Image: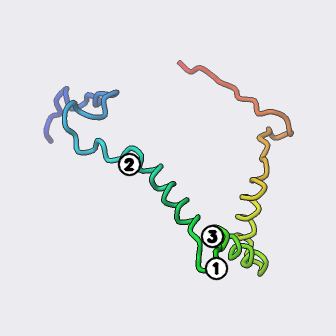
Amino acid sequence: MAKKGANSLRKPARGKPFASGKDPRRGHGPKPGAINEGRELARKVLAEKDEHGVEAAMAILRKMADKAARGDVKAAQLLFDRAWGKPEQPVTGPDGGPHIIHVKRVG
C-alpha cells in the first residue's frame, strides 16, 4: 500500500470556487435583458387579435373557463388563483401560536 503524504490529507481551499482568469464555467447565465425581451414577446403575442378581433389572452381564458366548467380542477384552481390570489397560509406552531426556535451553541 502506498504511503499517503501530508499534502493528500489537506482539505481543499474554501472561498474561491473559480481560479483567476478564463474559466469555462463562468458567464453561461441569461444575457442581460433576455428576460425582459421574453416578457415583451409574450405580451405582444397575447395582445394579438384573431380574425374576429378577440385577443389571444381572452381566447386562452375562455378555453380555461370551459375546461373548469367541465370539471377540470386544475383549470379552475388556476383561474381562481389568478383572479383572487392564492389563499393565505398562516405559519403557526403546533398549538396555533408562533414558532419558537431554540438555538444551542456547541463547542
Density class for disc 1 (Cα within 10 Å; few <14, some 14-19, many ≥20) is few
Cα distance in 3D space between marks 2 and 1: 37 Å
Percent x, y of residue 69: 79, 78
- Which residue is denoted by mark 1 in the rendering? 52
Check disc 2 and report the residue beneath it.
Answer: 30
Q: Residue at x 21, y 30 (%)?
A: 20
From the viewer's perspective, is 107 left or right of 87? Answer: left
Place of residue 71 in the rendered image (x, y in percent of width and height, measured from the top left): 77, 78
Q: Amino acid at mark 1?
A: His
- Please tell me whether mark 3 sits on a helix, a strand or a loop: loop
Q: Residues within 10 Å of mark 2 (few under 14, many from 20)?
A: few
Q: CA distance from mark 3 to mark 2?
A: 30 Å
Pair 2/1: label in front:
1
- Given residues 85 and 49, the one toward you in this image is 49
Q: Which residue does the image show at 69% across and 26% down from the upper left?
A: 102
Which residue in the structure is indicated by mark 3? 55
